[in-house]
Image: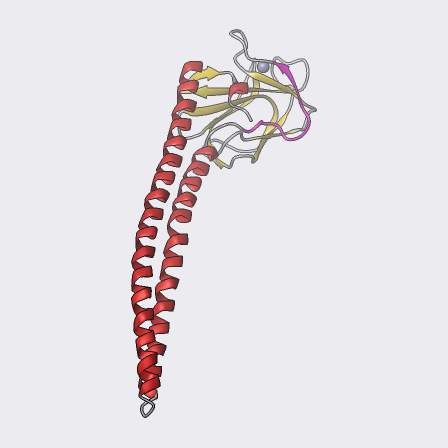
Amino acid sequence: MNKTLIFLLLLLIAVLLLSQLFIVLENRKLKMKIQDQQQELDVSTKYIQQLTEQMNKIQETEMADKSRPDKLRELLNSYLKEQKDEEYTQKIKVPIEELQEDLSEYEKKRRFIPDLIPVKGDYAISQRYSEKHKATDFAAPTGTEVIASAAGEVLSVYQDKYFGNVMIVDHLNEYATFYAHLATTIFEAKTFVEKGETIALVGSTGNSTAPHLHFEVLVNGENIDPETILK
Ligand SMILES: [Zn+2]
């Protein structure tokens, strides 16, 4: 099960690296395209400057008709300005939009990954993950807020002889989280909860000697050590 997690993390890292590489390559392509366009623009700018100079000479010699070259020069100037503006907007817009898309995609995924410590405020880890105890126990005073480690749907809320008041949240992917020994639960099954939302209060219900949250993380129904994923 740890292998699955490592594989998923590696896959995530690989996807991120690939998307970064893609952005770098796209940026380079765009830069080259812009350089090409810049060169073309430089050539046409030079050509237009030569034309303008010629026209100025004509203007100097043709003192009789002043209005025509002035009008043409005005047109040329506005043409040059337009070209420049278009270049700048093209340069700025494309890469930033792509980057923002990638970032929002990444954040969307993170929202449903249970990596948030499930208690609000002070706590002490009183028992770590082992073959016999497939959870992390967070010792905290009774009434401490228990928060959803990721967004998802409350799968079930029930009472158990050993675990006391229990809540299970399905993160609508391969992940699910299990919260036990709760004093009270706030939501019923089928409710959507947001990442970080208070879902219950720490208690000592069931077979428990002191108030604590018993927290399990499951990947495709198999327990993993919560501490390998919590941030
Ligand atoms: Zn426990």
Q: Look at the image and give the residue range highlighted in magenta.
A: 116-127
For residue 12, side relative to residue 132 (left or right): left
Residue 192 lies, with reference to residue 2, above or below; the image says below
- 117 in magenta: yes
Point 47% across, 29% down: residue: 113
User: Image check: 112 left or right of 199?
Assistant: left
In which quadrant of the rendered image does the C terminus lie?
A: top right
* Viewer-proximal residue among 63 and 21: 63
Residue 46 in magenta? no
Residue 1 visible somewhere in the drawing: no
Residue 205, picture quadrant: top right
Q: Position of residue 94 (x, y in %)?
A: 37, 50
Q: Residue 145, position in %: x, y?
A: 63, 31
Q: Looking at the picture, how far across and down is residue 221, in whole percent?
A: 41, 18
Tell me the quarter of the picture where residue 67 sits: bottom left
Q: Residue at x 36, y 61 (%)?
A: 86
- Residue 116, x across and y down, in percent: 55, 29
Q: Quick one: which residue is furthest to the top in this view?
A: 132
Q: In this rendering, would 30 be left or right of 157?
A: left
Is 146 placed left or right of 108 in the picture?
right
